[in-house]
Image (cartoon, coloured by chain):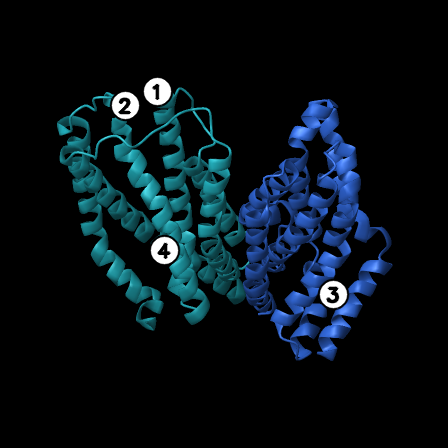
Chain colours: A blue, B cyan
Amino acid sequence: MTAAAALFAHELRLAFRSGGEMAQGLVFFLLALSLFPLGVGPGPATLERIGVGLIWVLALFAVTLTLERLYAEDARDGTLDLYGVSGLSFEVVALVKAASHWLTSGLLLVLFSPLICLLLGLPAEAYTAVPVVLLLGTPTLTLIGGIGAALLVQSRRGGLLLALIVLPLEIPVLIFGVSAIEGWVSGLGASAQLSILGAMLLGALALGPFATAAALRLALE
Amino acid sequence: MHYFANPLRFQRLADAIFPYALIATLAATAVGLYGGLVTAPMDYQQGDAYRIIFVHVPAAWMALFVYLTLAVAAVVSIVWRHPLADLYGRAAAPVGAVFCFLALVTGAIWGKPMWGTWWVWDARLTSMLILFFLYLGYSALADAFDDPQRGARAAAILALVGSVNLPIIKFSVDWWNTLHQPATVMRFDGPQMHLSMLWPLLTLALAFKLYFVTVVILRVRAEITERRITNLRLAAEAGDD
């Protein structure tokens, strides 16, 4: 337990001390977002229509891309070997790394999402709906993406391959995330979608670390 | 279980099966195509255009079936570290991807005269497209490592994760599709398929399976040979020093 706590504190310290790295996902999100009005036109009706989908698609990209270095850096400087001899199981390592990564990237998206709603001109209900749904959905993205990041540790390729193997697996989160926000904003209710998002989070929380740990063990062989 | 871990033993078995599989594939394809293209009657609604189902449906079935076998091979690979399971995964995945591609392309060709468009974002089409990407991801991951063994094992983990996720993806895509009803109307609730159309379909489904067995044997043999060549080369290099 103390080892897990130490690892957690270590990860958070690293994230805070590496300066701009923590904000990279958010900056990417905002940059990509600002390309859309330039591409499809700044009409408020268009942006409101595509806004919710846009937020989720970009959240998928932002989370996936920031996960790329999650384990690769540890493998390169030998930290991964230290985890192996530390007595911590890789399942716990996977869980702690996912938690600390989400706290320093996914949570940032959640906190800034009202601002994003403002930029897209979404209706007032969205200012609460978007952060809540993102809060429930983005940890699942981190957990699923972590599997992909661990699988690619010793590979010769990164970025695009990570997107190729992880994005199809994240489609359910995209579908129910968008549907939950739209249901909430339109007043139709979103309890079913929120329940399913919660179920997917619990499922990913229960199964994801095992797959990630299997991939990490493979990387150390 | 590990009897066939020895590639020579496997190769002996594969060599024994191969000619029969090849002949059976050709026979079933010929009979099925004759039944589908010649003896089966024309559809009263779709005319002759419906005949593409004799390729389309077996391809779609195979695309799903091959992913299932990949998941089973993944379990065997992870639990028993069976070398043959790794070879199978690398050999079968591209074939499954081609079946998936074939189902998508024949679906598009069929969709043009029937629905008036090459592509609709229908639940089945979308699921099939996602399955195609899962295949691409599997193969790309298997090839992303210098050590083919490592690539195969990584891909096995991915296949297992994918097989857990596949029903969830299917369910979400169905949900998504009912929310966003496409403008095109398509119905399949016509009369049950007549026996004269059903038997060529089932025969061709069998032909596709046999073809899959034949091609996988060929590909596994090629894979084994390739590894042997690599090993011989490495040994020769070591001998030079």
Q: Is residue A42 above or below residue A160?
A: above
Q: Which residue is mark 1?
A: B113
Q: Are marks 1 and 2 in contact (CB under 8 Å)?
A: yes
Residue A166 visible here? no
Residue B45, which numbered label?
none
Q: Quadrant of residue A164?
A: top right
Task: Report the chain holding disc 4.
Answer: B
Q: Which residue is mark 4?
A: B69
Q: Are marks 1 and 3 in contact (CB under 8 Å)?
A: no
User: How many other residues sit within 10 Å of disc 2, few (<14), some (14-19) or many (≥20)?
Assistant: some
Q: Amino acid at mark 3?
A: Asp
Give the camera-side residue of A59 and A11: A59
Q: How much space separates mark 4 and mark 1, taking CA atoms?
A: 34 Å
Residue A32 in the image: state x and y as whole percent: 73, 36
User: How many other residues sit within 10 Å of disc 4, few (<14), some (14-19) or many (≥20)?
Assistant: some
Q: Which residue is mark 3?
A: A77
Residue that appears at 36% across and 55% down: B69
Task: Report the chain holding disc 3.
Answer: A
